[in-house]
Amino acid sequence: MPDLPDWLSNALPEAARHPGLAIASLGDGKTLGKGGFKLWSPAFGNGEVLDPCFTAVEEDAVAPPLEWTAPPPGSQEIVIIVEEASSDNDVPPCQWALWGLPGQKGKLLEGEVPPRAGKNALGNSEWLLPDPPIGETRHYVFQIFSTDLPLTLMPGASVEELKKAIQGFVTGCAVLYAPFTGVEAADADFDENFDLD
């Protein structure tokens, strides 16, 4: 597989540098972080481990909360694509693909259902709960794009259809990275029960 461009390699740790990431083909050095455009989560910092409550470890797990700054001027819509960058496949599995968010500063609350969502790697339109084998670490890359046109894609579109729809229309982009190592559910419960903070 080809290497990531330098502008993106500098934004991601080596373990998360999958050349098939959506941002590798949709963004560039000029749009990455343009005008201070940034994606973050109040639940974890860039490079911090995902909490089990956002993974298959917990039965009532939900999608993590996300927030972003105002995109570059002229932006009409916000698109978010989350991919698992540890895959050996040419295209990393899609954990979440969503759009229909206004082209302005905004956020998604924990577990909030986005206005429009596309198919994840399992073919449904939900947050695909990270579920690595026990002891194996997977790397998840949250990618945000602002576009200078509103999308007409219907909910349930594939991530490939989504990427095709915004190709050439991206005004800004940013990344947020989080790893997660597979654990047994009982281990997660044990850690929670004996947290003395």
Image: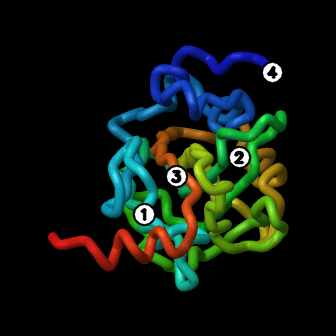
The residue positioned 49% from the left and 78% from the top of the image is 111
Judge left or right: residue 106 versus residue 93: left
What residue is shown with label 4? 1
Separation of marks 4 and 3 at Cα, in angstroms: 24 Å
* Along the line of sight, the residue nearer the viewer: 193 or 164: 193
* Along the line of sight, the residue nearer the viewer: 3 or 69: 3
Give the x, y percent position of residue 176: 46, 45
Judge left or right: residue 90 versus residue 69: right
Among numbered discs 3 and 2, the one appearing first in the sequence: 2
Q: Secondary structure at mark 4?
A: loop
What residue is shown with label 1? 51
What residue is shown with label 3? 180
Q: Are marks 4 and 1 in contact (CB under 8 Å)?
A: no
Separation of marks 2 and 1 at Cα, in angstroms: 31 Å
* Along the line of sight, the residue nearer the viewer: 5 or 148: 5
Q: Secondary structure at mark 3?
A: strand
Give the x, y percent position of residue 51: 42, 63
* Foreground disc of the pair 2, 4: 4
Q: Are marks 3 and 2 in contact (CB under 8 Å)?
A: no
Give the x, y percent position of residue 147: 59, 48
* Foreground disc of the pair 4, 1: 1
* Residue 4 visible from this viewpoint: yes
Q: Is residue 190 above or below residue 87?
A: below
Q: Are marks 3 and 1 in contact (CB under 8 Å)?
A: no
Mark 1 neighbour class, 10 Å CA radius: few under 14, some 14 to 19, many 20 or more = some
**Label for residue 166?**
2
Q: Quadrant of residue 22?
A: top right
Among numbered discs 4 and 3, the one appearing first in the sequence: 4
Q: How many marks?
A: 4
Among numbered discs 4 and 1, the one appearing first in the sequence: 4
